[in-house]
């Protein structure tokens, strides 16, 4: 499962007047979330994702809120709803339906970024496909992609959407070693809209299982400048820390939390809080159970035949 991974609300600059000219430009969304999550995968609540799809015939559901801010503007998403489905082996289908808002600082020093009124409502919806390309072995990490499509469902006139479909094209890898897990990778965000920049992003994450109830992790995540008029106009590198509190069973229900701040480049902070559920059919366990039941029936039949007794209660 992935990851989360990391959904942040879009931010659009409002109509501005500078040097006697009126103009209006769209502003780039922040990094969007995630994917799914399980014991051996990342994504939410972190910005680094992973190459591990949801298991075949399994499902994940999240309710979460997230925020990302710079001195020019603070954006948030929440409530937001994420659903992941193991549609076929080694393939995960992903969707996020988010509500959110923008809160520009309206300070002249950051203009034209971070200017205009605050707004809230439905923001751009996310669809995605995660594909496992190479499975993990003792010496080779798991490698996969998690292509995302940001759909223009938010009102771009209010600053809640980009106004066009845009894309995230990453490559992720993962390696497990005992109670330790490593995720890392990089990708390119492609935004075919006036006033936007395509920009790279990437990072790596280290997680450790503390006990059966708690996993803790930390990541270094970086992104390039997202455009000349956006709140995230310049590159930023962040350190985020957080974890997973298992509320029911080892994976069935979890509380996800993370917080981070920039350590280089533009000042930026990030936070995520959510609840996660997973369920589904485990064919392997079902097959093993059926196999064991058949073997037990066969054993009873043999005992009855050789002992000369009749099975009074049947099979």
Image (cartoon, rainbow, N blue to C red):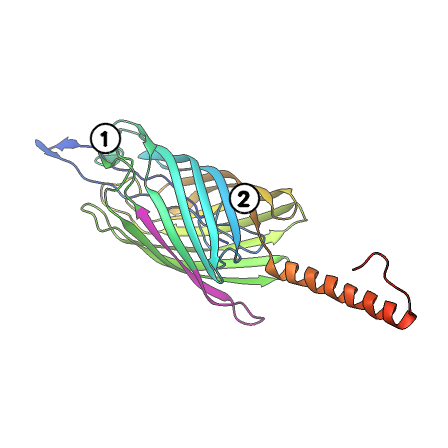
Q: Is residue 31 above or below residue 51?
A: above
Q: How many residues crowd around disc 1 within 10 Å: few (fewer than 14), some, or many (20 or more)?
A: few
Location of mark 1 (residue): 108
Judged from the image, the secondary structure of the residue bearing numbered disc 2 is: strand
Tell me residue 223's x, y (percent): 35, 51
Is 11 placed left or right of 96 in the picture?
left
Rendered image: mark on residue 171: none
Q: Is residue 218 above or below residue 143?
A: above
Tell me residue 287's x, y (percent): 65, 62
Tell me residue 197's x, y (percent): 24, 50
| Residue 3 visible in the picture | no
> Which mark sits nearer the N-terminus, 2 or 1?
1
Report the magenta stretch's main SS.
strand
Q: Is residue 21 above or below residue 289?
A: above
Rendered image: mark on residue 242: 2
Q: Look at 58% across and 62% down and name the residue there.
A: 176
Which residue occupies the foreground of this view, 81 or 78? Answer: 81
| Residue 214 visible in the picture | yes
Q: How many residues crowd around disc 2 within 10 Å: few (fewer than 14), some, or many (20 or more)?
A: many
Tell me residue 301's x, y (percent): 82, 67
CA distance separating discs 2 and 1: 35 Å
Which residue occupies the foreground of this view, 195 or 147? Answer: 147
Question: Which portion, as a residue range, is magenta?
Answer: 131-150
């Amino acid at each position: 499962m992935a990851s989360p991974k990391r959904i942040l609300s879009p931010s659009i600059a409002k109509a501005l007047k500078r040097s006697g000219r009126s103009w209006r430009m769209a502003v780039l969304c922040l990094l969007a979330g995630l994917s799914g999550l399980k014991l051996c995968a990342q994504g939410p609540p972190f910005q680094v994702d992973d190459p591990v799809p949801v298991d075949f015939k399994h499902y994940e559901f999240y309710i979460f809120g997230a925020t990302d801010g710079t001195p020019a503007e603070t954006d948030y998403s929440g409530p937001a709803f994420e659903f992941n489905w193991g549609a076929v082996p080694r393939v995960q289908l992903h969707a996020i339906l988010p509500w959110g808002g923008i809160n520009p600082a309206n300070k002249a020093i950051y203009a034209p970024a971070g200017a205009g009124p605050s707004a809230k409502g439905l923001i751009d919806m996310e669809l995605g496909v995660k594909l496992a390309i190479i499975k993990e072995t003792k010496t080779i990490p798991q490698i996969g992609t998690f292509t995302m499509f940001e759909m223009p469902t938010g009102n771009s006139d209010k600053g809640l959407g980009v106004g066009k479909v845009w894309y995230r094209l990453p490559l992720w890898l993962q390696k497990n070693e005992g109670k330790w897990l490593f995720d890392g990778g990089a990708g390119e965000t492609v935004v075919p809209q006036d006033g936007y920049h395509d920009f790279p992003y990437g990072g790596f994450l280290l997680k450790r299982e503390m006990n059966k109830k708690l996993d803790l992790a930390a990541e270094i995540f970086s992104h390039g400048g997202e455009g000349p008029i956006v709140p995230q106009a310049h590159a930023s590198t962040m350190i985020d820390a957080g974890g997973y509190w298992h509320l029911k069973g080892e994976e069935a229900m979890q509380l996800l939390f993370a917080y981070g701040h920039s350590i280089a480049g533009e000042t930026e902070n990030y936070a995520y809080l959510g609840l996660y559920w997973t369920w589904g059919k485990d064919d392997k366990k079902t097959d093993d159970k059926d196999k064991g039941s058949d073997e037990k029936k066969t054993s009873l039949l043999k005992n009855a035949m050789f002992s000369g007794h009749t099975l009074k209660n049947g099979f």
